[in-house]
């Protein structure tokens, strides 16, 4: 039960529990900072003009790259089992 709750998802994205916790923490911190920048931009339109959109784009790209890396690692692992 604990294994399923705490380890299934990190494994599914090719990370350990601690690695996933670090990645999620960094991801969340960047989202919070970008959110503050967006709120300040709302008050002061001349500040942080591209910060929100750039952060969303960067985080999305990082997430997609990590998924691809995990998929490639899984495929290589499977191939190694057959060789």
Image (cartoon, rainbow, N blue to C red):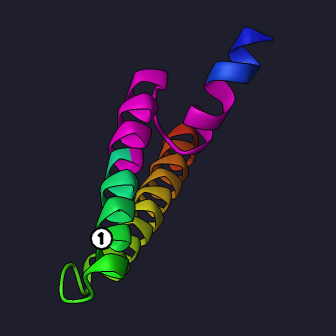
Q: Quadrant of residue 58?
A: bottom left
Image position of 33 with respect to 40: above or below:
above
SS class, disc 1? helix
Main secondary-structure element of the magenta-colored stretch = helix
**Residue at left 32%, top 78%?**
43
Instruction: Residue 68: give x, y in percent of width and height.
Output: 47, 63
Can residue 22 be found in the magenta stretch? yes
- The magenta stretch is 7-28
- Residue at the spot of label 1: 40
**Residue at left 30%, top 55%?**
33
Horizontal side, residue 4 vs residue 35: left or right: right
43, 77: nearer the viewer? 43
Image position of 29 with respect to 67: above or below:
above
Q: Residue furthest left?
A: 47
Instruction: Residue 6: give x, y in percent of width and height.
Output: 64, 21
Instruction: Residue 7: give x, y in percent of width and height.
Output: 62, 23
Horizontal side, residue 81 vs residue 41: left or right: right
Horizontal side, residue 52 vs residue 64: left or right: left
């Amino acid at each position: 039960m604990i294994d399923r709750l705490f380890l299934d998802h990190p494994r599914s994205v090719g990370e350990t529990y601690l690695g996933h916790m670090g990645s999620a923490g960094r991801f969340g911190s960047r989202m919070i900072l970008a959110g503050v920048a967006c709120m300040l931009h709302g008050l002061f339109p001349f500040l942080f003009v591209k910060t929100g959109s750039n952060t969303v784009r960067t985080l999305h790209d990082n997430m997609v790259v990590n998924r691809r890396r995990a998929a490639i690692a899984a495929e290589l692992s499977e191939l190694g089992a057959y060789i």
